[in-house]
């Protein structure tokens, strides 16, 4: 995976740890307004917070299991 496609230009040279600790709007396509809404709704402040959000984990698990369902 090319991480540079997933993050804003300012974060392309950062380490994965730095990106994980960065504000959510470091992700490509996530605006400052989106980040503010995530913070208000779910107290998500960083990329790591978003990845660890239980709703994100639930959605990923449902999709992964749906792919194996007959």
Image (cartoon, rainbow, N blue to C red):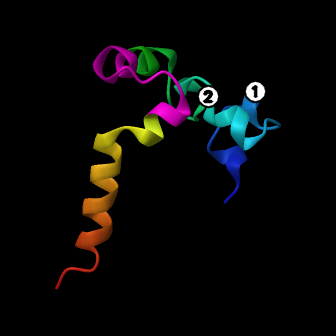
Which residue has dot 2 on it? Answer: 26
Spot occupied by residue 19 in the image (x, y as percentages of width and height): 67, 35
Q: Position of residue 3 (x, y in %)?
A: 69, 49
In magenta stretch: residue 47: yes
Q: 35 or 16, which is in the foreground?
A: 16
Image position of 35 with respect to 61: above or below? above
Judge by depth and name the residue closer to the eye, 51 or 3. 51
Instruction: Identify whether 64 is placed above or below 32.
Output: below
Which residue shows up at 34% across the image and 45% down it? 56
Residue at 20% across / 80% down in the picture?
69
> Which quarter of the rendered picture does the C terminus lie within?
bottom left
Magenta span main SS: helix
Q: Assess whether mark 2 and mark 1 are in contact (beta carbons under 8 angstroms).
A: yes
Q: Name the image quarter holding residue 21.
A: top right
In the rendered image, the residue lying farthest to the left is 70
Provide residue 35's location: percent of width, then percent of height: 45, 20
39 in the magenta segment: yes
Residue 22 percent coordinates (x, y): 63, 26
Q: Which residue is mark 1?
A: 10
Give the magenta-colored segment's residue range. Answer: 37-49
Left or right of 22: which side holds 49?
left
């Amino acid at each position: 995976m090319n991480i540079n496609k997933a993050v804003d230009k300012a974060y392309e040279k950062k380490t994965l740890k730095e990106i994980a600790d960065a504000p959510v709007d470091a992700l490509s396509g996530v605006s400052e307004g989106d980040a503010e809404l995530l913070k208000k709704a779910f107290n998500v402040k960083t990329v790591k917070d978003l990845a660890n959000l239980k709703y994100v984990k639930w959605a990923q698990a449902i999709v992964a299991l749906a792919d194996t369902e007959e």
